[in-house]
Amino acid sequence: MLKLFTHISRVLVGVLFVYSGFVKLVDPMGTQFKMQEYFSEGVLNLEFLIPIALPISILLVVAELVLGIMLLVGYKPKITVWSLFALTLVFLFLTWYSYTYNKVTDCGCFGDAIKISPKQTFYKNIIFIGLIAVLIAGLKYIKPIVSEKVASITTLVSILISFSIVYYVLHHLPIIDFRAYAIGNNIEEGMKYQGDGEVPPIHDFMIETDEGDKLEEMLAKDKAMLVVMYNFDKTEKEGIPAVAKAAAEAKANGYEVYVLTASYIEDLEATQKEYGMPYTFAFCDETALKTAIRANPGVITVEKGTISGKWNWRDVEDIKY
């Protein structure tokens, strides 16, 4: 009976960890923002870890995916199972803290692919601690499904592919966009309440200027370009000339251009002149901008309220006007 339960647990735990790791691997910045939230003063008060939240996030999601693969192929079962146990304990603590103190209302356990509450995630982790306990008890039944050499090569390849995906995504954009701001989604539709009392998928998104919110104006445009710099102090300054050039080309092709930032710019006119961006600068919530595009700066094109394209500043030469 233990042998059967071990095999069942092996498949369930392995598949879940591979899936959970992959959906976060394609968007490591999402996990970074979530870890920064956990490390913040109002939550775990570990602010000294905020500057290294990204490498911590990358290591966590890569470990999650690779350990899942190692369990499925049966490579180094003792190390794998105990590592999974330790990792699940970390997740259990974080979700318990979120659930008990109502601090982080979305734990981000499945990235933006699946949204479940901290309470649901906490109980899910309790179940998985139980499944891993079965794996610990049945360690002798976890055998490689391939030769030791093939299993080790599979593990190494999964590590190399994982870090390659991370490198690509951080220099461009997530290869799969699970967020409400994905290409093809309509912003106005995403801002509508569903009638169940939940927050709409797109919220806190605005184009706030001294003349008021220009969001409705933007949504009505046939062609609009949003140049996003969610935090001007942290913006990759080498990318500003590229997005400024893209904005100029867009303007010449009939686009209305808006520059969105959550930062207060003391001398706006001087900044516009310095970077060659004489367009509408507007304020938007930082979290909304981080959610909209994982680039700083980045470019979003919108046609009659529907997102038609998104680019990291490194890729703006690919924009078709």
Image (cartoon, rainbow, N blue to C red):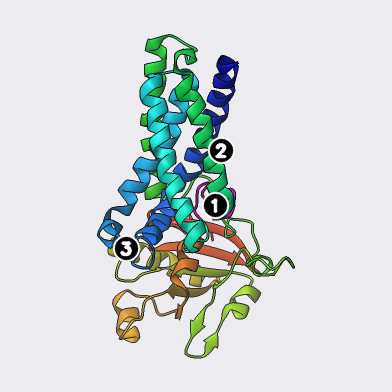
Which residue is the site of mark 1?
A: 112
Q: Which residues are magenta?
A: 107-117
Q: Amino acid at mark 3?
A: Asn
Which residue is the site of mark 2?
A: 127
Residue 116: in magenta span: yes
* Label 2: element kind: helix
Left or right of 258 in this view: 183: right
The x and y percentages for residue 41 are 33, 67
**Mark drawn on residue 178:** none
Q: Amino acid at mark 1?
A: Asp
Cβ atoms under marks 3 and 2 closer than 8 Å: no
Instruction: Answer with the quarter of the image where residue 195 lies.
Output: bottom right
Q: Nearer the viewer, residue 229 or 304?
A: 229
Q: Nearer the viewer, residue 105 or 166?
A: 105
Q: Nearer the viewer, residue 159 or 102?
A: 102
Could one spot residue 230 in this view of the protein? yes
Q: CA distance from mark 2 to mark 1?
A: 22 Å
Left or right of 162 in this view: 127: right
